[in-house]
């Protein structure tokens, strides 16, 4: 500041003014006045004044800091108690509101849909008409549903059986205990599973006798359902589920040791892989010949015969095997004692 | 029908049939087998693109002895061919880049199951791309969902299990909405074949019948697939799922699975409902709004991360926003830009995930930025690949990301209403945010490491496969930028005959 002032006073303009007015500069006057005033009372602050002022400032600053901290603490406390509660409530209310509004929209939609069972609905068109009228003649299957899923729309069903397979593989990835001898966790888990198998209760005589009588019947019924899938209600999916249930029942009554005489992990793998590969290869042949309008050696045969309807009974067997194995694998992996 | 027209059929059936066989092979053989199958599928797809280039229009292929509304059928055109090529190529390269990490992360006797998942995922993606039937699309969508879950859980750690649970809940919600949509649509139209549904919907729209259920169908299908492809408000499952799974899984999930769903949605808009009907319902405006918010919010979340994988994951959310923004514009150019961005983003994102894995490997398996300093020098190829990917994401000229950003801007200009303003403004903000977090990362990996940090002596040499995959990926990224004109022409041609 002083430098600027000096610069100013030594520049030509103030000097010109000084020369014109022939007197002191305004700055000089002010400085003199200030000197005079300070001579009368002590207007300049003393050390005590400065100290008091600074103490006051310090106190104010501390107060401000404390207030701020208290506010933060309060806000933190609030978010942890009341705020959390409020947020929870808000979430709950929002979820209920969203659910109710979606339900309302969907109910409203259902009300606007074509009436159920009316003959002139869009669903009753040439597609279902051909399935019903020509289904048996074209596919050779008396059971129209089997003809639809395994012949007309076999590609979807191929995907669907792979959904089952991939679900079983996911469970294996997640739950199957690795037979890796170097990994300490898997060694420990293997021991636990072996213990589970060992100490599993298997002396329920009532259950065993009932199962000895029931399981053959259930298995037979499952096989019947699979084999007659193209003739009567049933098919690979339902028959396979029945067979899987029979295996699970047998396992529950007699334990792993006896079940593993005929069904091990290796059986599971072999059966699934063979069934799926057969499905994929045979259907690939059928798709290829169909798309290229080639002659196919698969013929519908005589409807109603056990081995008729082209590939359908074989595909039913394949699907049944996959479903049965998948059900059994699911059960054993979610239960104590690995497969 | 000529023999080459069976290529789509082979591309679906080959991985589908060989998946079951892979499950009984021992780990190493399963790997070779998967590699062979994926190479064959990629080669066939490439040949198919070349052959389709000389073929006018599209054709349908009967899956069985019965013609379309009764049996299943697939359809192939230029767009499908190009998409299938990109998808199979990215699958092959992602697997190649992550082989060493798969060995590290997945127990030896579960690896063959992992390859089963990859093969079934490939088959499902191919089926999704080529199918002409809405229910077939749903069946293979289920396979994709389950396979994606297993890809996450294959690395059995607490984090991945939590991530997979979240992923599964959100994705099943999406599948459920989509299935509900198909059911209602079947009730309204009486068909499952895409072209027949389109006729029925057009006549419904003309007569004004069933207007309300039709709107609901469009809404729940769009939202269902939006949830599955991580559109902005439904993206909460993304960071964990992409951040903690093994690099191949992260690359495949972010660049193929979510893109498969988006491709299906585009297919539904074009081939099932029809663009005019979609535009009249206003669902595109909603998607557009979500997309714009997502573009900004995804990037902001990415900036806040301290973990490189989670950062890339959040960047995916922003990029999915770009794609939905292109679709939300509702015009041809917007769709073209969206499809091009599907390719650009998938090629780039999978490379970024693999490269980030390599960089983390060279820094003592840490994915935190503070440990990654100087990793670009310790693992040179991964560093260069990451830089190329980051530049492409930011929109550096001569790379794929630049072309797609330019196309989005051009498409918005073409629309010329309030959307133009919004798109341009948000595009600038989002690019700016992208630059912040990607360049920050690039600078980080080329900085001097912290004092006293001792990194493994391995120097990040990840073997031949990893390097080859990253080099190929970089090449594809640059090629996508340099030859973008041809690809965009192919997409335009494909979209022209798509409807």
Image: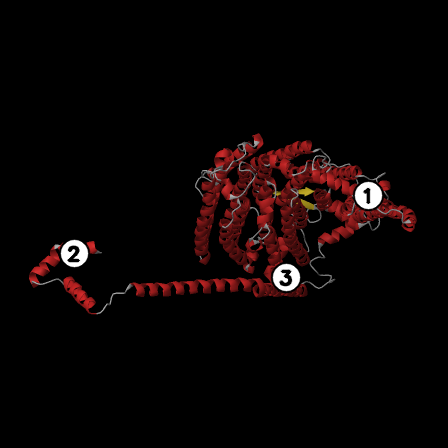
Left-right relation of B450 to B61: left
Element under disc 1:
helix
List x then y, in percent, for residue B457: 54, 32
Q: Secondary structure at mark 2?
A: helix
Q: Which mark is residue B213?
A: 3
Is the residue at mark 1 from the same chain as the one at mark 2?
yes
Q: Which residue position holds label 1?
A: A197
Give coordinates of residue A60: x percent, y percent: 40, 65
Query: What is the crowding at mark 1: few (fewer than 14 residues within 10 Å), some, or many (at least 20)?
Result: some
Name the one closer to the observer, B282 or A143.
Answer: B282
First reached walking from the N terminus: tag 1 or tag 2: 2
Q: Residues under labels 1 and 2: Cα distance?
A: 103 Å
In the image, B127 versus A164, the foreground residue is: A164
| Residue A245 in the image: above or below residue B86 | below
Number of other residues with Cα within 10 Å of mark 3, as a class: few under 14, some 14 to 19, many 20 or more: many
Residue at coordinates 65% horizontally, 50% vertically from top-left?
Answer: B165
Q: Residues within 10 Å of mark 2 (few under 14, many from 20)?
A: few
Asked if the residue at tag 3 contacts the one at tag 1, i.e. Cβ–Cβ closer than 8 Å, the answer is no
- Vertical placement of residue A100 versus B472, above or below: below
In the picture of the structure, the residue carrying the numbered disc 2 is: A8
Would you say A116 lies left or right of A31 here?
Answer: right
Whether labels 3 and 2 share one chain: no
In this rendering, the label closer to the viewer, 1 or 2: 2
Residue A73, x across and y down, in percent: 51, 62
What secondary structure is found at the residue carrying circle 3? helix
């Amino acid at each position: 500041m002083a430098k600027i002032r000096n610069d100013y006073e030594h520049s030509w303009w103030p000097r010109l003014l000084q020369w014109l007015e022939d007197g002191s500069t305004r700055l000089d006057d002010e400085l003199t006045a200030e000197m005079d005033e300070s001579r009368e009372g002590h207007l300049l602050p003393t050390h005590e004044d400065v100290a008091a002022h600074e103490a006051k400032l310090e106190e104010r600053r501390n107060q401000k800091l404390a207030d701020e901290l208290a506010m933060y603490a309060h806000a933190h406390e609030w978010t942890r108690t009341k705020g959390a509660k409020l947020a929870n409530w808000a979430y709950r209310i929002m979820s209920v509101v969203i659910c109710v509004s979606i339900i309302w929209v969907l109910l409203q939609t259902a009300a606007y849909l074509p009436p159920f069972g009316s003959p002139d609905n869009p669903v009753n068109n040439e597609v279902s008409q051909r399935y019903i009228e020509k289904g048996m003649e074209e596919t050779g299957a008396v059971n129209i549903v089997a003809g639809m899923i395994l012949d007309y729309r076999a590609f979807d069903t191929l995907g669907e059986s792979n959904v089952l397979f991939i679900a079983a593989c996911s469970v294996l990835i997640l739950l199957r205990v690795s037979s890796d001898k170097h990994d300490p966790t898997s060694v420990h888990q293997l021991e636990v599973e072996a213990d589970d198998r060992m100490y599993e209760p298997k002396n329920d005589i009532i259950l065993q006798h009932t199962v000895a009588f029931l399981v053959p019947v259930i298995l037979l019924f499952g096989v019947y359902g699979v084999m007659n899938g193209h003739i009567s209600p049933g098919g690979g999916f339902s028959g396979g589920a029945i067979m899987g249930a029979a295996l699970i029942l047998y396992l529950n009554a007699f334990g792993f040791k006896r079940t593993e005489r005929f069904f091990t992990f290796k059986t599971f793998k072999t059966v699934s892989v063979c069934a799926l590969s057969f499905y994929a290869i045979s259907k690939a042949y059928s798709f290829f010949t169909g798309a290229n309008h080639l002659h196919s050696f698969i013929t519908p045969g005589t409807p109603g015969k056990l081995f008729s309807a082209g590939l359908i009974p074989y595909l039913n067997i394949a699907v049944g095997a996959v479903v049965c194995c998948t059900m059994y694998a699911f059960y054993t992996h979610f239960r104590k004692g690995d497969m | 029908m000529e023999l080459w027209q069976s290529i789509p059929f082979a591309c679906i059936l080959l991985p589908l049939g060989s998946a079951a066989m892979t499950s009984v092979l021992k780990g190493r053989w399963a790997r070779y087998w998967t590699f062979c199958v994926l190479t064959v599928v990629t080669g066939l797809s490439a040949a198919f693109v070349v052959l389709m280039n000389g073929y006018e229009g599209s054709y349908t292929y009967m899956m069985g002895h019965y013609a379309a509304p009764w049996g299943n059928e697939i359809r192939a055109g230029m767009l499908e061919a190009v998409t299938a090529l990109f998808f199979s190529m990215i699958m092959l390269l992602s697997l190649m880049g992550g082989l060493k990490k798969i060995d590290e992360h997945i127990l030896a006797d579960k690896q063959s199951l992992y390859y089963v998942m990859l093969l079934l995922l490939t088959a499902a993606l191919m089926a999704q791309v080529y199918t002409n039937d809405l229910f077939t699309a749903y069946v293979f969508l289920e396979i994709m969902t389950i396979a994606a879950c297993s890809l996450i859980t294959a690395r059995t750690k607490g984090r991945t299990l939590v991530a997979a649970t979240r992923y599964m809940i959100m994705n099943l919600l999406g599948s459920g909405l989509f299935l509900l949509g198909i059911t209602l649509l079947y009730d309204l139209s009486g068909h499952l074949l895409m072209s027949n549904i389109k006729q029925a919907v057009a006549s419904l729209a003309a007569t004004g019948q069933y207007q309300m259920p039709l709107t609901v169908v469009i809404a729940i299908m769009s939202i269902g697939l939006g949830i599955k492809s991580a559109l902005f408000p439904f993206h909460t499952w993304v960071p964990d799922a992409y951040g903690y799974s093994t690099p191949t899984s992260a690359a495949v999930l972010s660049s193929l699975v979510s893109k498969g769903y988006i491709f299906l949605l585009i297919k539904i808009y074009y081939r099932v409902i029809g663009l005019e009907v979609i535009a009249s319902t206003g669902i595109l405006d909603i998607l557009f709004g979500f997309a714009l918010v997502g573009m900004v919010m995804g990037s902001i979340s990415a900036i806040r991360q301290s973990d490189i994988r989670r950062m890339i994951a959040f960047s995916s959310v922003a990029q999915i926003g770009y794609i939905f923004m292109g679709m939300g514009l509702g015009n041809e150019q917007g769709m073209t830009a969206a499809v091009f961005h599907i390719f650009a983003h998938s090629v780039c994102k999978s490379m970024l995930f693999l490269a980030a894995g390599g960089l983390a490997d060279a820094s003592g398996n840490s994915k935190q930025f503070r440990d990654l300093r100087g990793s670009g020098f310790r693992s040179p190829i991964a560093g260069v690949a990451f830089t190329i990917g980051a530049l492409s994401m930011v929109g550096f000229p001569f790379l794929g990301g630049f072309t797609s950003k330019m196309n989005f801007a051009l498409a918005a200009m073409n629309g010329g209403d309030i959307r133009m303003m919004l798109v341009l403004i948000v595009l600038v903000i989002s690019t700016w945010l992208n630059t912040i977090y990607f360049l920050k990362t690039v600078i980080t990996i080329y900085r001097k490491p912290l004092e006293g940090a001792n990194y493994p002596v391995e120097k990040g040499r990840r073997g031949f496969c990893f390097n080859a995959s990253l080099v190929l990926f970089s090449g594809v990224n640059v090629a996508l930028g340099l030859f973008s004109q041809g690809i965009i022409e192919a997409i335009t041609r494909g979209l022209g005959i798509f409807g």
